[in-house]
Image: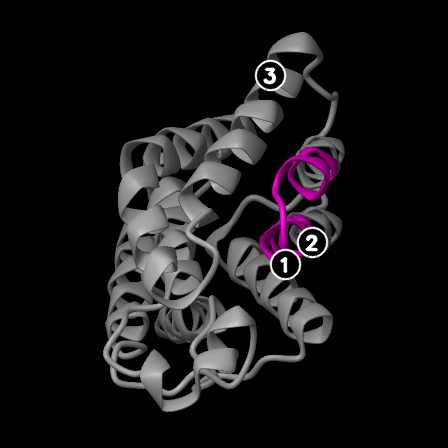
Amino acid sequence: MRVDAAIWIREFAALVDAHAEELTALDAAVGDADHGTNMRRGLAAAVAALDDSTPATPAEMYKQTAMALIRGIGGASGPLYGTFFLRFGTAIDSGSGTADFARAFRAGLEGVIARGKAEPGDKTMVDALAPAADALDEQVAAGTSGPDALDAAVAAAETGRDATTPLIARKGRASYLGERSAGHRDPGATSAVLLVRAARRALR
């Protein structure tokens, strides 16, 4: 199993572009109504950087992507997604198996948690990423193949995303709304699902 770094980034950009209006509409209910716009802009910059210069190693490519996202995405999402790719790239190194991907994904998640100080249940992107990481670990332990492992990760991320709807936000801009944040699906968890879906599409 190998998730192609360049394809993953391009697929993530394509999915965000296709869902940008949905992401912005979700953010309008609990935030600044700019999550879709910002994510689209940052990922377009990441793809443009790839078009301009493709790094020699996956780790360098993830670092380049992280820098583009940090510069191009406003608010907290840029640093959080940037941190995910930085930590992922450092952890993946030259590994290409399912276990390597799961380990690097966990490292990316831990980076997001450390940067954003959020935990599962806080109504953030962690609510999608953490179940995906858990699913990957479970699939590795069971000896499941790469495609099935990533399918399980996508399903777990989607379940985690949907579970944010009734939650009261405890982190991020949505937390300012208090109980009024309940009843709205979290935009960050929604874009995080697209990240996992894009990885599945990039599986080679």
- Label 2 or label 1, whichever lies nearer to me, is 1
- Above or below — where is 189 with respect to 61? below
Q: Amino acid at mark 1?
A: Ala
Mark nearer the N terminus (2 vs 3):
3
Circle on res. 79: 2
Q: How many marks?
A: 3
The residue under label 1 is 76
Q: Residue 48: which numbered mark, if any?
A: 3
Residue 102 visible in rendering:
yes
- Expressed as whole percent of the image width and height from the top left, the position of residue 107 reads 65, 65
Frontmost residue, 198 versus 22: 22
Query: Which residue is drawn at the image coordinates 36% and 57% (left, top)?
Result: 28
User: What are the residue bounds of the magenta stretch?
Assistant: 67-84
**Disc 2 versus disc 1: distance between alpha carbons?**
6 Å
Q: Are marks 2 and 1 in contact (CB under 8 Å)?
A: yes
Q: CA distance from mark 2 to mark 3?
A: 19 Å
Q: What secondary structure is found at the residue carrying circle 3?
A: helix
* Quarter of the image where the C terminus is located: top left
Position of residue 7 relative to residue 120, above or below, is above
- Out of 111 and 100, give the one closest to the viewer: 111
Asked whether residue 81 is drawn in magenta, I would say yes
Question: Quadrant of the image for the N terminus?
Answer: top left
Circle 3 packing at 10 Å, graded few (<14), some (14-19), many (20+), is: some
Residue at 63 percent of width and 58 percent of height? 76
* Whether label 2 touches label 3, CB < 8 Å: no
- Type of the residue with mark 2: Pro
Q: Nearer the viewer, mark 1 or mark 3?
A: 1
- At x 48%, y 56%, the residue is 32
Tell me the element at label 2: helix
Disc 1 from disc 3: Cα separation: 22 Å
